[in-house]
Image (tube, helix red, strand yellow):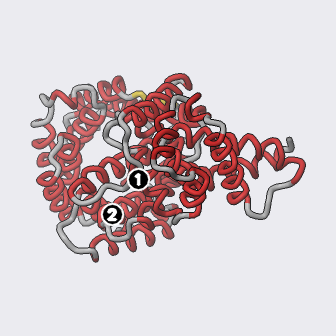
Amino acid sequence: MTSDAHRAIEAVWRIESARLIAGLTRIVRDVGVAEDLAQDALVAALERWPESGVPDNPGAWLMATAKHRAIDMLRRGKMVERKHGELGAELEARQEDPEADLEAAIDDEVGDDLLRLIFISCHPVLSTEARTALTLRLLGGLTTEEIARAFLVPVSTIAQRIVRAKRTLAEARVPFEVPRGAALAGRLSSVLEVIYLVFNEGYSATAGDDWVRPALCEDALRLGRILAELMPNEAEVHALVALMEMQASRLRARVGPSGEPILLLDQDRARWDHLLVRRGLAALERAEALGGSLGPYALQAAIAACHARAHTAEETDWTRITALYDALAQLTPSPVVELNRAVAYAMAFGPAAGLEIVDALTSEPSLQGYHLLPAVRGDLLAKLGRFAEAHAEFERAASLTRNARERELLLGRAAACARGP
């Protein structure tokens, strides 16, 4: 196979796989079987396209191939062999034609199926790790190896998470549907959490040699944009997209020529992607136009907008940011929100004001291994001229982080404190 053909097939798969799996899941009612059928279609493409060329409509070709294989499976009773006999029995009992049913499912509105797939991939019955892996696999089109590489865990670990997730969904008989009414809010929260978790891992990698992983940010942004199209009346969906667009706008400025981290206040704002800034501000306007009180993502997006609108670090409206963090702390209180609030207070009212909030967090159990607590405390102590204490805090922060680039940054700051003013 030529490298050009391989790249073309890979690109088509990334674009079409979610739509393909979504259409198939509706009829076979098992996301694992649906993915197997989609993978069969991919194998067929890998065998045929290098010789025949990529079809004019590759997505339609993959869909037709998967559809025929699904029909063959139902005809030959393969569902029984694959431990899915209950589906065949149910169809027979209802005297339905599985081929006609499959045709209807494939030809139905694709957006509905994609939305259902998003909700089933992020179902709360799964652990956060399983939801993340399954979402990237089914909706992001990533291979198991790519997901493992992105999160710096063994391939076998990701493979096990995906297999267990699909088995859990099948055993729990999770319906392939979009929740309605009161159930929607909780389920949507789970979906948004997964998308933002993926984005954050790309924006500030928890481990490894790279400070950022832009590809993960792009995957999360694509999923967020799809969700916003499918759920145009959900303010928090638009708010999450706004937040990610504005944060992604800084990616080029977050690293120096050698990959070293550059913190927000030190970034060259001319290197920010101002198209993404405009998109983010427009998404925030859509969220706010839908009315109601601001949710957690809308508040975070409003904070990001304060940074995005400031042409220089000195122009940042820190007083407004403190007010937004106060609102966020009331809506979703957490130690991490308090730590971010402390930074805002330090910028608005001086380092002593921020340190007072941080010191109240030092006994918080959930932050004992969180490297950013001593990092923030060290920064505030340094600004107050308490260099010996700041040095110790930066050393501790460096010992806690698993990211090599961040460790270098923190050790550098510790060394600067050791030299004094």
**Residue in the picture at 50% in, 41% down:** 31
**Residue in the picture at 48% in, 57% down:** 113
Classify residue 294 as left or right of residue 411: left
**Figure quadrant of residue 304:** bottom left
Name the one closer to the observer, 305 or 162: 162
Spot occupied by residue 324 in the image (x, y as percentages of width and height): 19, 61
Classify residue 404 as left or right of residue 13: left
Task: Let me know if residue 314 appears in the view.
Answer: no
Spot occupied by residue 202 in the image (x, y as percentages of width and height): 47, 44
Give how far apart the Cα atoms at labels 1 and 2 are.
26 Å
Spot occupied by residue 288 in the image (x, y as percentages of width and height): 27, 73
Name the one closer to the observer, 262 or 252: 252
Name the one closer to the observer, 108 or 373: 108
Mark 2 lies on a secondary structure that is: helix
Count of all numbered marks drawn on residues in the image: 2
State the mark number for residue 1. Answer: none
Spot occupied by residue 359 in the image (x, y as percentages of width and height): 12, 36
| Quarter of the image with the N terminus in it | top right
Q: Amino acid at mark 2?
A: Ala
Dot 2, crowdedness within 10 Å: few (<14), some or many (≥20)?
Answer: many
Residue indicated by mark 2: 239
State the mark number for residue 266. Answer: 1
Task: Let me know if residue 275 appears in the view.
Answer: yes
Dot 1, crowdedness within 10 Å: few (<14), some or many (≥20)?
Answer: few
Q: Is residue 238 above or below residue 125?
A: below
| Quarter of the image with the C terminus in it | top left
Residue furthest to the bottom in view is 289
Q: Amino acid at mark 1?
A: Asp
Mark 1 lies on a secondary structure that is: helix
